[in-house]
């Protein structure tokens, strides 16, 4: 063992890359690092789990270096180079043989390895491959007698951090290469950790959980053992977040994570899937009672008081359990069943556990349907509904001409629920009528508030359900809402579907005419997806056709959709109607629609649906600006930046 004192004053990456580009291109390195992460993340992360990332502290400790080289003169020259380093202290060890080197590398006792390319019958490339296969944790640097781009590239591909030509090496260059290799290795391990572990709790994340579950099930199949999967969800955790803020909620999650981890065996896995949902994989259980004992213990330790912001909190979990292989031979089935059992535990009082049984499959749908219906009936009274607004942009002026009101349900436990989950149920049980009236009244009041605040005049559009439109009192309801909000009818647009109009009888036709007589605009939503009977277009007082997103998504690359969209625009204009295209997400779609004189567009290219407080800047924004040279519209990026930053 030889101790060499040296020094280090910092690393100049730009200079370093310029000096080494021939043998270690940065782009090649980045690609190799990405591939190595994908290939070896399981091995690397496994070491990170049990201890902090290893590696030399370059500023305060010795750097342990192993030189693998058959020639003593090379060892002496390397010793001299390291002794000439300025600020860093190195400890250099030398082995000359291939097998001795491999055995030493297996012990992972060094911070960096310098490997000569010529190692007798074997090469440094072979040693790198075997070292990587044997779990080498420190970076490896290849040393060659002459510049050879093929050897350099192959060394990087098999896992080397760098490749240096010996007669071109000086003290500064070698020191920088070692420093850079060690720091890059740390970054590599940190990236692997962040890719597979939850940054808040340090537990396995969803991605790693699924990998570990698959491995656990495979081991169980080989050993004839059982695996119990537990889904654990904290009861009423939203109340903690709302009252103490997310910092307080995060403290609770970290305490719960540590309590769960402290009770698990080394063979078990605890993961956080997100939010307040945790999972536990119990391997090698003998009976159901084993899983029961663990579940009871987890209920007890989680329920112990937690001090957060000088407040004593009591948190309880609901636990669902599914046993492999009886109730899930594959990961997806086991996950689904454990999740279902957890929701059963919540419905049966919380702070308890439930095992999955086959009877849950038939009962769960009815139970969920009933629970959703009950919650839906109370949602209006509890003020759980809210509206988001998506702007419609005029292609001539580039400004907002209308805002579509879109209903959202902020469930107290589930958060925002997608309309597709509750609108069909509301249609079925009749709740859609009072919900629709609330949407109409709220949108009209909001539009009037925007106008009174001095924003440019624009309309607000509201979707109508068939059940709501067929109410005999519907026109009177609309008149009453307009009067209460004091909104001029010309700034209200009602959207109906093709199927609703196709099925309309004489009474419905009269309602449309009465609405039109009030000055309200009428549009056909999702045009082209219904019965597509063109006769109603000339029979009903329609102002605007909205081309469904299914015909917009693949234009202009799809000739069929392009032809249909072009035909719809021409048809509408021939009948003196306006045309709005929905679901516009790309510049190519925008250019295509503008060239065919579509009147307005709506979609994520412009803006998603946003809360009312985020809408006001939209009125002052010119979302699109004409480009004289090409005749097309482009994003106004300065306006977009202001929009996103408020």
Image (spheres, rainbow, N blue to C red):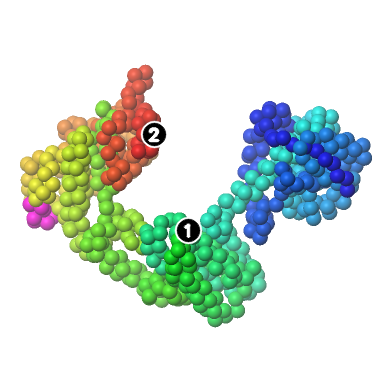
Mark sitting earlier along the chain (1/2): 1
Occupied quadrant, residue 4? top right
Whether residue 193 sits left or right of residue 575 in the image: it is: right
Instruction: Give the residue drawn at x 80%, y 33%.
Output: 171
471 is within the stretch colored magenta: yes
User: How many residues crowd mark 2 within 10 Å: few (<14), some (14–19), many (20+)?
Assistant: few
Q: Point out which mark residue 641 bears.
A: 2
Occupied quadrant, residue 552? top left
- Residue at mark 1 to residue at mark 2: CA–CA distance: 31 Å
Examine the rendering and report whether any part of residue 137 can be seen: yes
Occupied quadrant, residue 246? bottom left
Examine the rendering and report whether any part of residue 523 can be seen: no
Q: Which residue lies under the disc numbered 1?
A: 250
Q: Which residues are magenta?
A: 470-477
9 is within the stretch colored magenta: no
User: How many residues crowd mark 1 within 10 Å: few (<14), some (14–19), many (20+)?
Assistant: some
Instruction: Give the residue drawn at x 8%, y 56%.
Output: 472
């Amino acid at each position: 063992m030889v101790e060499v004192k040296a020094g280090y004053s910092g690393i100049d990456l730009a200079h370093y890359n310029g000096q080494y580009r021939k043998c270690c291109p940065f782009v090649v390195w980045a690609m190799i690092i990405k591939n190595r992460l994908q290939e070896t993340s399981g091995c690397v992360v496994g070491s990170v789990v049990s201890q902090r990332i290893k590696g030399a502290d370059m500023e305060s400790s010795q750097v342990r270096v192993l030189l693998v080289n058959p020639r003593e003169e090379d060892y002496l020259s390397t010793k001299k180079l390291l002794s000439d380093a300025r600020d860093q202290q190195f400890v250099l060890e030398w082995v000359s043989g291939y097998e001795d080197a491999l055995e030493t590398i297996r012990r992972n006792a060094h911070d960096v390895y310098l490997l000569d390319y010529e190692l007798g019958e074997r090469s440094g490339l072979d040693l790198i491959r075997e070292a990587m296969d044997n779990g080498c944790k420190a970076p490896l640097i290849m040393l060659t007698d002459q510049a050879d781009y093929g050897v350099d590239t192959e060394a990087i591909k098999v896992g080397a951090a760098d490749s240096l030509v010996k007669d071109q090496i000086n003290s500064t260059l070698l020191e920088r290469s070692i420093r850079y290799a060690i720091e890059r290795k740390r970054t590599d391990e940190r990236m692997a950790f962040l890719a597979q572990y939850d940054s808040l709790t340090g537990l396995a994340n969803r991605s790693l959980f699924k990998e570990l579950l698959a491995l656990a099930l495979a081991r169980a199949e080989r050993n004839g053992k059982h695996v119990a999967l537990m889904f654990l969800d904290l009861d009423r955790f939203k109340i903690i977040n709302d009252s103490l803020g997310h910092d307080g909620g995060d403290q609770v999650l970290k305490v719960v994570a540590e309590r769960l981890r402290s009770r698990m065996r080394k063979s078990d896995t605890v993961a956080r899937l997100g939010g307040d949902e945790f999972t536990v994989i119990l391997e090698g259980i003998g009976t159901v009672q084993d899983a029961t004992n663990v579940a009871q213990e987890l209920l007890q330790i989680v329920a112990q008081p937690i001090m957060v912001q000088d407040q004593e909190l009591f948190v309880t979990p609901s636990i669902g359990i599914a046993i492999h292989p009886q109730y899930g031979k594959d990961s997806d089935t086991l996950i689904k069943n454990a999740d279902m059992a957890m929701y059963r535990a919540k419905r049966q009082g919380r702070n308890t556990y439930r095992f999955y049984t086959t009877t849950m499959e038939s009962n769960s749908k009815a139970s969920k349907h009933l629970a959703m219906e009950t919650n839906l009936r109370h949602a209006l009274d509890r003020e759980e509904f809210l509206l988001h607004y998506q702007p419609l942009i005029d292609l001539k002026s580039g400004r907002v001409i209308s805002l579509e009101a879109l209903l959202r349900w902020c469930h107290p436990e589930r958060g925002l629920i997608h309309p597709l989950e509750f609108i069909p149920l509301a249609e079925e049980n009749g709740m859609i009528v009072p919900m629709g009236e609330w949407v109409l009244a709220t949108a009209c009041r909001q539009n009037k508030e925007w106008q009174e605040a001095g924003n440019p005049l624009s309309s607000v559009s509201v979707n109508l359900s068939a059940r709501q439109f067929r109410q005999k009192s519907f026109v009177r309801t609309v008149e009453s809402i307009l009067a209460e909000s004091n909104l001029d009818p010309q700034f209200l647009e009602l959207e109906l579907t093709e199927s609703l109009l196709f099925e309309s009888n004489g009474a419905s036709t009269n309602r449309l005419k009465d609405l039109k007589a009030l000055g309200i605009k009428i549009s056909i939503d999702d045009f082209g997806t219904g019965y597509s009977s063109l006769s109603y277009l000339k029979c009903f007082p329609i102002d605007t056709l909205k081309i469904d997103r299914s015909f917009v998504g693949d234009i202009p690359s799809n000739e069929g959709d392009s032809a249909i969209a072009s035909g719809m625009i021409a048809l509408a204009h021939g009948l003196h109607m306006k045309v709005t295209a929905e679901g516009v997400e790309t510049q190519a779609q925008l250019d295509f629609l503008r060239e065919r004189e579509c009147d307005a567009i709506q979609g994520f290219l412009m803006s998603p649906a946003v809360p009312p407080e985020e809408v006001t800047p939209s009125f002052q924004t010119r979302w699109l600006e004409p480009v004289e040279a090409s005749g097309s519209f482009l994003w106004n990026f300065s306006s977009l930046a202001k929009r996103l930053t408020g």
